[in-house]
Image (cartoon, coloured by chain):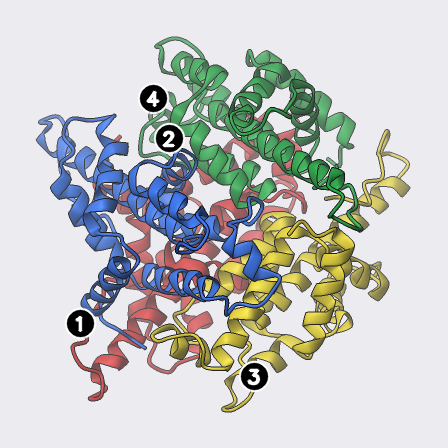
Chain colours: A green, B red, C blue, D yellow
Amino acid sequence: MLYSREEMLEMNIKLLIERTVTVEDIAEVAYRQQSKWSDAITMEQCVESVMKILSYRDVFHLLQLGVEIDRLAEEGIIREPMRSVLQKDFGMFGIDELFGLEIAGKYGTIGKTNFGDIDVNKPLVVDRLNADGKEAGKMCHTFLDDIVGAIAAAASTRVAQMNKELEAADDPTVKKIRLELDLD
Amino acid sequence: MLYSREEMLEMNIKLLIERTVTVEDIAEVAYRQQSKWSDAITMEQCVESVMKILSYRDVFHLLQLGVEIDRLAEEGIIREPMRSVLQKDFGMFGIDELFGLEIAGKYGTIGKTNFGDIDVNKPLVVDRLNADGKEAGKMCHTFLDDIVGAIAAAASTRVAQMNKELEAADDPTVKKIRLELDLD
Amino acid sequence: MLYSREEMLEMNIKLLIERTVTVEDIAEVAYRQQSKWSDAITMEQCVESVMKILSYRDVFHLLQLGVEIDRLAEEGIIREPMRSVLQKDFGMFGIDELFGLEIAGKYGTIGKTNFGDIDVNKPLVVDRLNADGKEAGKMCHTFLDDIVGAIAAAASTRVAQMNKELEAADDPTVKKIRLELDLD
Amino acid sequence: MLYSREEMLEMNIKLLIERTVTVEDIAEVAYRQQSKWSDAITMEQCVESVMKILSYRDVFHLLQLGVEIDRLAEEGIIREPMRSVLQKDFGMFGIDELFGLEIAGKYGTIGKTNFGDIDVNKPLVVDRLNADGKEAGKMCHTFLDDIVGAIAAAASTRVAQMNKELEAADDPTVKKIRLELDLD
């Protein structure tokens, strides 16, 4: 059960692809959120951050269990009353957001508010997953759309923090600054 | 999907009994935690608080989904890698605590710390569920022990707050106090 | 210290007005967020929900302490290093969002994501407070803009839940539904 | 405002000493909590983990602001109604626990439940701070006791995770395991 980070990253990427999502899809959401505030953001930074986040043990557990719940709901294996709640992505069900907040919270309270923005406004792949999930006979993405949005929010927050520290390092008035590229 | 509070309470009590837990089992944990601090606590208050908490919509979702995950793990239906993680209640898996913190957090941050105490020290029924879950061939209670502990912590916190407000109402120096028996 | 709900509501409204914010300002933010999804929302519901939220004990503590920190930063009484962090609303400071998430979380994880949307996109009074706070010599609103946004998000979430329950009650296929106007 | 990790660690240690707490005091609480479960834990690991946690930016903000609030309450500078609430460490005030949960949550939900155990059962320095804070005319430690307990819980959780990964690396049945000594 104690997978290495490389194994967890690999298993997560494989599962996301099975569910129609790529690392680039997620990085684009992060890029769109953060490029509003700064020109210094690059897609490369966003891709690298998404990969980093996909290698964490708690993200591994949340992604693997969340998608497994989606699959069991999709196949009608989960019993009532939860089957209908999950299949219809019932508006007052909030455990998918709970998974999302826990992932995004790896980058603090600002990670969480960035997730809220993505969850409410549904950019790009988040919108597609949400729409697919609501179409009858299609896949159930009740958990996946929140998990994908949360990984994007975490990546967006990580890139913003990294770039602020890089700027500070260029600033001659800041002394003794240590590059903290790996903030986490 | 929009069950009434009475329906949710009834469905929760039924499911708990299927999983060997009674309302009184949970109330005893709340009573033990809170009676250390005050003589004014009664078992009746604890039972009433447990019933109240079991009627909330988000507690309904967390309890019903958590126990369903336990059952699917028990029956070997959940796929790897999560099956082994759940069946063995892997020490670095924390989504069961996430469910618990969300339930206990209905009574604020003090609800959450009270849950931490119960989760670590495992009194009464929490200990039994945890032990049963670890025995080979027995039921899987990875989620249930945390959920039960969290309902107890929420009840314990609710009773403490109620009694503080009742005391204040008896105190002649406190004016204009309104009984807030239903704090939430 | 054990104020009644009426006293806490009154003290909160008075303090908000001292800091240039009215109950209606907050209700407008809630109304704007929720009226996107449903025509059934009214300003009256939003005002009533804001008042309800302002009467809770933990919201009272978070609002009173948050605004007191703003005032002490404004007057230069808070010592370094926190004085500069607070006066300039430093982008990597997240304790103001922590206060906001705790308030909005009274209405569950959906309350929290609704707060994230408001915090990132800054509608109406939230934008004004944020702008005033950043202007040299003006008031420090580092905590207040998040607290106000969070009360609006909580009110918006409460109104949405209330209206879903009201709809269900009108639906003849739903039996035994109990109006849960007070979602507490 | 963008201090380096070394600067933040140094400022945090200095402030803790001003408030009568040493790194070793905190490491002892972590050691006591974790040595119950495993013989492999050492005080050196606990000290190293406390230092690591004291170097994080969000812990820096929470510790510096929390202690500043304690000092302002102690000196009577904070206005009513919060002055009395803070000076008397009012039982229904939970913002100190909010700070603690945010610190401990850096090590996930298990960090938070470990904090709950320490917060309720008050071992060693946490008990001393709590008692000192309640004595008339002494220091106000309303925030500090929770912050110190949370740093200990975070350190205890980090050491436990590190040691599990070290054990796994020694286990010949585990392949491809990568030492993740620095989990964060």
- Label 2 marks a residue whose chain is A
Identify whether D174 is placed above or below D146: above
Q: Which mark is residue A82?
A: 2
Give how far across and how far down residue C147 sits, in percent.
37, 51
Q: Are marks 1 and 3 on the same chain?
A: no
Q: Residues within 10 Å of mark 4 (few under 14, many from 20)?
A: some
For residue D139, which numbered disc appears in the image? 3
Which mark, residue A13? Answer: none
Pointer 3 and pointer 4 on the same chain:
no
> Residue D14 at x, y = what percent?
73, 70
Residue indicated by mark 1: B178
Please tell me which of labels 2 and 4 falls first in the chain.
Answer: 2
Mark 3–mark 2 distance (CA, rounded to whole Å)? 52 Å
Q: Residue at x 41, y 40 (%)?
A: C119
Identify the chain of the residue marked 1, using the numbered disc in the image. Answer: B
Q: Label 4, on which residue?
A: A88
- Element type at marker 2? helix
Looking at the image, which is closer to me, B84 or A123? A123
Looking at the image, which residue sits at the far front? Answer: C137
Instruction: Write down the chain letter for disc 4.
Output: A
Secondary structure beneath dot 4 equals loop
Amino acid at circle 2:
Met
Q: Amino acid at mark 3?
A: Met
Are labels 3 and 2 assigned to the same chain? no
> Quadrant of residue D16 in the image?
bottom right
